[in-house]
Image (spheres, grey):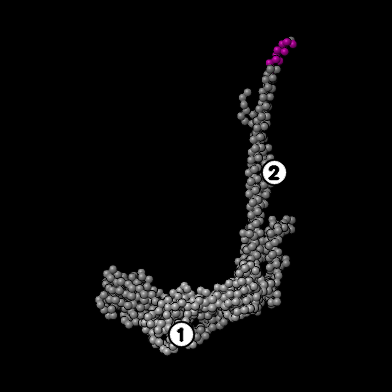
Amino acid sequence: MAGISSLGIGSGVLNSDLVDQLVSAERRPTEQRLNFNQQRTEALISAYGTLKSAITDLRLPMRQLSSPDNLKAFSGTSSNDGVSVSVDSAKASQGTYTVTVDSLAQAQSLASASFGDRDSTAVGSGSLTISVGGKTTTLDIDSSNNTLQGIAQAINDADTGASAGIIDTGNGYRLVLSSDKTGADNAISIAVNDSDGNSTDTAGLSQFAFDGVTNNLTETVEAKDAVVQVNGISISRPTNNIENLIDGVSLEVSEAGVTSTVKVSQDLGKVADRVGAFVEKFNALQQTIKGLSGFNAETGQGGILSGDSAIRGIQNQMRQIMGRVVPGLENASVRTLADVGITTNYETGGLDFDRTKFTEKLQANPDDVTALFAEQGRASDEQIEFIRSGVNTSPGNYSVNISQLATQGSLSGASVGAGDVTIDVDNDELSFLVDGETSVSIQLTAGTYTREALAAEIQTQLNDSSALAATGRSVTAEFDATSGAIKFTSEAYGSESNVNLTSVDTNSAATLGLDVSTGIAGQDVAGTVNGQRATGEGQVLFVEGTGGAAGMQLRVTGGTVGSRGDINFIQGVGDRSVDLISSIVGLDGSLEAKTNGLQKDLERISEDRARLDLRIESYRERLVAQFSAADSLIARLNSTQDYVSQQLAALAPQNNRNNN
């Protein structure tokens, strides 16, 4: 009998549709369970992501409030538009200043005589030596660049510190040079070596000489420093941006002859804005938590994270930080957030902010309000300054003991008496190595000096050193009348602080008492904090170990060795909140652990789906095999039935004849 190639042919019932229905019925309960679990797991991952984002949003305003500088915000005002003010709150302090602008800083400009053309007529050859701001550049002028345009191009290409251009006056062309920087020290000097043999006349290249003796160029704008008076004290600067005059205050002067009242005051509104931003983000977090875990009375259902232990833990930790007295402020005028107008709204779980009360408290008790939010170290010794804490520093009171004070490196010359000294080419050059890193060479101005005046001249040259200015280092020179020697002292403290003389002129030792020599290095501060060893770097102590003071940094500016009182470290709400938030949303935090666990659940669901596919495929194969066998049997039975029916039908006529 021919084989059956398709289900149902033999029976008409056991077909492929029936297999599909049975397979679908077998698959449906497990697949529905897996779909439900996957949807819930993905919803949980999304919910934890939403919660993590809301918590992370709170970290920025809390981080701002954890910095003491952000709670001391200062702003500056000027009564005259000719003087503008900018303030660095980290360095500024309150004050009022009268600023008078005597003159503005200017960049020097020079102009040549008129020439008939700019790029065809040779104007001379030889060399130009241009000096600007201590930089000297020599330019060769020959047939390739001896036109007015060629000289201007050569100056610009050489980066001389001055820029050149050509102006068409209508009656001829003039070369114009301008210093790139303002200030008297950036004046332009041009020495000429004219190939015609005369470098001072007004012919050939000599037309461009301007060296203080031969001035064949016209000074159209004088090089000037800005000169201002602050509370009657006159100072000058090479630019119109006056810095390092008032701590934390920069002045930009734009008009000469004006007087302005500059006020630096605490900007209470800016600090209140930062606190308001914290309250806003905290309330947004509470709304997020309510939406994820709260109960909806209308639907009778709770949020997807209702009853979640991670949310309960986060809320409890936040309440502990926001509601309790800050350790260390138990006896202060400001102890809690409620004391500065930040109270809990028990209906919403959020915070209410009384801005007026906050600004009043900040104005009346700035130190306590700062400690309420930021970290603060309060030393009983005025010559000990708290710098910062470490990751493991705990709030508390710690005793300080100093075993060694920091000192400055210094170098003393030899005594050559107290008589006047003459500076000439044989003793006018000195070279130093400062703090082991900065090489400095100075040249003294020729003349006769008292020993005190000589020390002042050396100091002036050191102060004008661009090498020292570039590295932020400085050296003090002074004449010690007792020893009869000039002494040099580094401004820096610690073992890296020193002053060495690396080269002198031929007659310096005999006339100045200064010879090549190595100074005495400074010492680093050393001591203990609460018995924990502290190592020093200059005047700064770093507390080592694992105790409560570990990681704390203090600056010891003077005093004596021995017991130096104590320091009370206070960790405010902002600082503790940042630590808490970082621990919650960090890689080892509770939310990350929850999310990682859910990701693993998704992986298991995916594995369960793969196993379901294999099981269902095997089930389908068994059904097809069983149905095929049954279909073949039914087909054979049907065939037998047909055969029997045929035989019976064939016998029926014969039986009828026999009966007749």
Residue 212 relative to residue 522: left or right: left
Does 32 sit above or below residue 103?
A: above
- The tag earlier along the polypeptide, 2 or 1, is 2
Q: Is residue 601 visible?
A: yes
Amino acid carrying label 2: it is Pro
Residue 494 shown in magenta: no
Q: Report x, y in % for residue 222.
A: 39, 81
Q: Residues within 10 Å of mark 1 (few under 14, many from 20)?
A: many
Q: Which residue is at a point 70% across and 57% down the rendered structure image? A: 308
Q: Residue at x 30, y 74 (%)?
A: 127
Residue nearer the viewer, 1 or 470: 470
Is 280 on the left-hand or right-hand side of 175?
right
Q: Which residues are magenta?
A: 649-659
Pinpoint residue 376: horizontal percent, then vertical percent. 63, 74
In this rendering, is residue 290 above or below 356?
Answer: above
Mark 2 nearby-residue class (10 Å; few <14, some 14–19, many ≥20): few
Residue that carries the numbered disc 1 in the rendered image: 485
User: How far separated are the C-alphas under marks 2 and 1?
Assistant: 100 Å
Magenta stretch prevailing secondary structure: helix
The residue at which mark 2 appears reads as: 29
**Image position, residue 237 (x, y; %):** 46, 80
Which image quadrant for residue 212? Answer: bottom left
Q: Residue sitting at 66 percent across and 27 percent down?
A: 632
Relative image position of residue 369 (x, y in whole percent): 65, 75
Disc 2, SS: helix
Q: What amino acid is at disc 1?
A: Ala
**Mark 1: secondary structure:** strand
| Residue at figure coordinates x 72%, y 66% from the top left | 347
Side of 11 where 158 appears, left or right: left
Residue 182 visible: no
Q: Which of 235 and 10 lies nearest the eye of the viewer?
A: 235
